[in-house]
Every structure is written in C-alpha cells, then in structure tokens.
Image: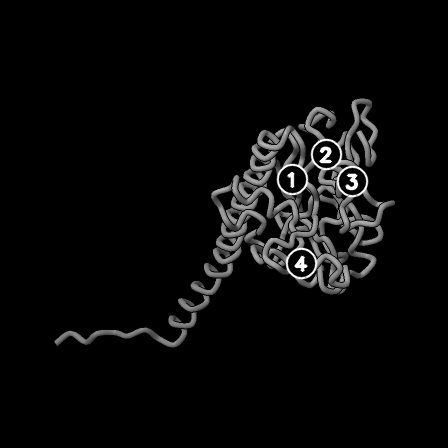
Amino acid sequence: MMRRRGFTLIELLVVIAVIAIIAAILFPVFAEARESARATSCLSNVRQTGMAVMLYTQDYDETYPILVYPHTGTGTLRAFNVNDAIVPYVKNSGFPICPTEPEAWDYDLQLAYCLGGQQGISMGQFKYRSYVANTAVFRSGVGNPSFPPFAQMPVLTVAALPRPTDNSLFWDGYLCGPLCTPACNRKNLIAIPGKAPRHHEGINVVYAGGNAKHLKARRRADGVWVAAGGPYEGRDELWGIVRDDGSIGANP
C-alpha cells in the first residue's frame, strides 16, 4: 500500500510566503486601478457639469448662472446656487460629487458657520460638494441680497467671456476647511495643505468651452498644492478670467 506524503511545515510556510508576496504586489495594482476608475468617473462628472452650464446659457439669454441667491419659494429662506440651477440639464444626480472624495466640503456647514446662516439653508439637493466654482464666471448679480453692495458684480454673458477653452468653470478642490479656516479660503486651493490632490497628484477641471481634462499639480514651499504648469500658459491660478492678452483677473 502506497503511503501519501503530506506537506511539511517548511513547505507550508514557503507557500504562505509566496502568496503574501503576490498579494503585496497585486493589492497596490488593484488600488491603483480602482482610483483610475474613480478619476475617470470624476472627469465625466465635471464634463457633464460644464455641458449643463452651456445648455443653461442657451435657455437664459446667453447668461451664466448666478453663484447663489435667496430662494423663498418653499416658505423657508434657502440658498439657491449654481449647482441647483443646472440640475435640470444633467441626468446624473451625483454630478457635484467626486467618487474619490465625496464629502470634500459640507455645504450645509458652510451656510451655517461660514456665512452665519444669512443665506438660509441649502435647497436640500446636495449636502456635500467636491468641486469649486470659478466665482469670476459665476457672479452675484446686481441687487442680490445675499451679497453686500460692494461685492455685487453683474452676471457674465457668454459673449463677454474671452478664450472659453482656457477659462475654468469647476475643478476638484475645497471651498473651505472645517469652520472656514483662512488657509482653506485661498482661491487656488486644490488640496488642503499637507494633503495631496485627489487623482494621481492632480485634479480634474472643466472649462467654459466644454472641454475637461486632468491637470498635474505641484506642492509649493508653503505646503499648498497648485496646478503644475497651470491652465494658463504655466500659471498655477485656476480662479479668474483669462483675457485675450493672456492676463488674468476678475473681469474680462
């Protein structure tokens, strides 16, 4: 009768070690693939957002949405913002959310603490946001009680915006950190200091021309991450309007 030989302890340990090595090699690959899928989904979200803005302007006399204004149609003071305005033009209800960081900043917290509740509560469609809007394009409008008179700017029209493929509308970022710390209110902030941007040390951006792309980022000496090689001929500022002469400012 033939006697079967079992595994020795050394052989079992070798097999376990080999499996552990393979797992250590494959797990980062799986994680990278998962993040690549999230980055692609995020890029699709910002592209849809940009297209929704373009559709909105076609219906509203070639005028960009107002950044935020008071809404009392429900009997309660609410803040109706640009994301609420373009909802009818998107099929994806999660368009303001990046799957890599779906709770990047809390809009209800911003309204309650950063703005002292003066603009009311949100419309209730989106508690969390992942993308920052270019406030040089989406403005307050004149006579908007949500803004003091000195901060009010007339709405911007499509015809008045130069170089649409160079002017950003939305990008991965943070409007403010917990309780709106000053360090997190910077216009070019794409990552909280000390924390890398979401997608392979880069961000997704959509422009007024409807084009969306991934931008690499770099970390400055002060720890703030900015767009590397920038969207504007090497500049790192995402906020603002790029004029015909290549300069950037709050106005065309």
Secondary structure category for the residue under label 1: strand
| Residue farthest left in this picture | 1
Q: Which residue is mark 4?
A: 77
Residue at (74% x, 36% y) in the render: 155
What's the image's color scheme? one colour
Residue 229's place in the image compared with 133, above or below, is: above
Q: CA distance from mark 2 to mark 1?
A: 9 Å
Q: Which mark is residue 142?
A: 3
Question: Pointers 2 and 1 in contact (CB under 8 A)?
Answer: yes
Question: Pointers 4 and 3 in contact (CB under 8 A)?
Answer: no
Q: Which residue is mark 2?
A: 231
Foreground: disc 4 or disc 1: 4
Q: Which residue is mark 1?
A: 205
Estimate the x, y position of residue 50 in percent, counting from the top left. Answer: 60, 37
Residue 58's place in the image compared with 198, above or below, is: above
Residue at (73% x, 33% y) in the render: 156
The answer to which quarter of the image holds residue 58 is: top right
Amino acid at the residue labelled 4? Leu
Query: Which residue occupies the foreground of this view, 204 or 4?
Result: 204
